[in-house]
Image (tube, grey):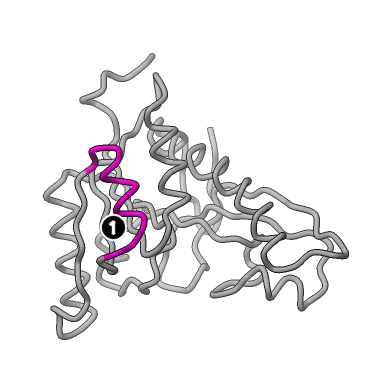
Amino acid sequence: MTRPADAALRLGVLASGRGSNLQAILDASAAPGFPARVAIVVSDRERAQALDRARAHAVPVVWLNPKDFGERAAYDAALTGVLAARGVGLVCLAGFMRILGPAFVRAWAGRVLNIHPALLPAFPGLAAQRQALEYGVKVAGATVHFVDEGVDTGPIVLQASVPVHPDDTEDSLSARILVEEHRLYPEAIRLFAEGRLTITGRRVLVR
């Protein structure tokens, strides 16, 4: 059964850069029957392109400047306040370049998703595509996972593989992985919104 628009899961998207995964989420949420919509986009960078993408869809935006806060815990508390004020039920990291502190992760446990351009647990952290090429793997990919207190260590929701070509550069591999990211992230959000995900230890069961 399709939810009425006002019953859709409210998403808070955190982004620091160009926001291509945000765009994929915005596009998906505009489709009839999609059970979630973006309620707020927050960035730590005033001129992030992601904020412009949100404004183009009439989505409220907040620039939360890290320089206004003395420590990470204070920033994270302010971030929680912004999200809670908008009634956010799921937080989606879309190229957010700040590490979220333990208090934030605990407060939103089981309600934060991230997208990573690798087949985790391989190649966590920055420049995953470069790491894959330097290691010489034949297959790379993308992962949507729940966020825990580690770096790209949370339970895995969905993954997609992408072949690595002999002549691949970091840019060419990144572009092919990005296609899968844009497909996977909205699907993971849909599954969460429909109540079809259950975390059991390190496993995420999909009904």
The amino acid type found where label 1 is placed reads Trp
x and y percentages locating residue 30 in the rendered image: 37, 28
Residue stretch in magenta = 47-59
Residue at (29, 68) in percent of width and height: 45
x and y percentages locating residue 107 in the rendered image: 24, 61
Q: Residues within 10 Å of mark 1 (few under 14, many from 20)?
A: some
x and y percentages locating residue 130 in the rendered image: 68, 74
Q: Is residue 49 magenta?
A: yes
Q: Secondary structure at mark 1?
A: loop
Depth order, front residue of 168/161: 168
In the rendered structure, the answer to whether residue 51 lies left or right of residue 195 reads: left
Residue at (48, 73) in percent of width and height: 151
The part of the image, by quadrant, that contains residue 165 is bottom right
x and y percentages locating residue 94 in the rendered image: 42, 56
State the residue position of label 1. 108
Quarter of the image with the N terminus is top left
In the rendered structure, the answer to whether residue 181 lies left or right of residue 130 reads: left
In the rendered structure, the answer to whether residue 180 lies left or right of residue 29 reads: right
Q: Residue furthest bottom?
A: 70
The answer to whether 113 is drawn above or below residue 126 in the figure is above
The answer to whether 72 is drawn above or below residue 64 in the figure is below
Depth order, front residue of 64/79: 64
Residue at (15, 85) in percent of width and height: 70
The answer to whether 166 is drawn above or below residue 207 in the figure is below
Of helix, strand and loop, which mostly describes the magenta segment? Answer: helix
Q: Residue furthest top?
A: 1
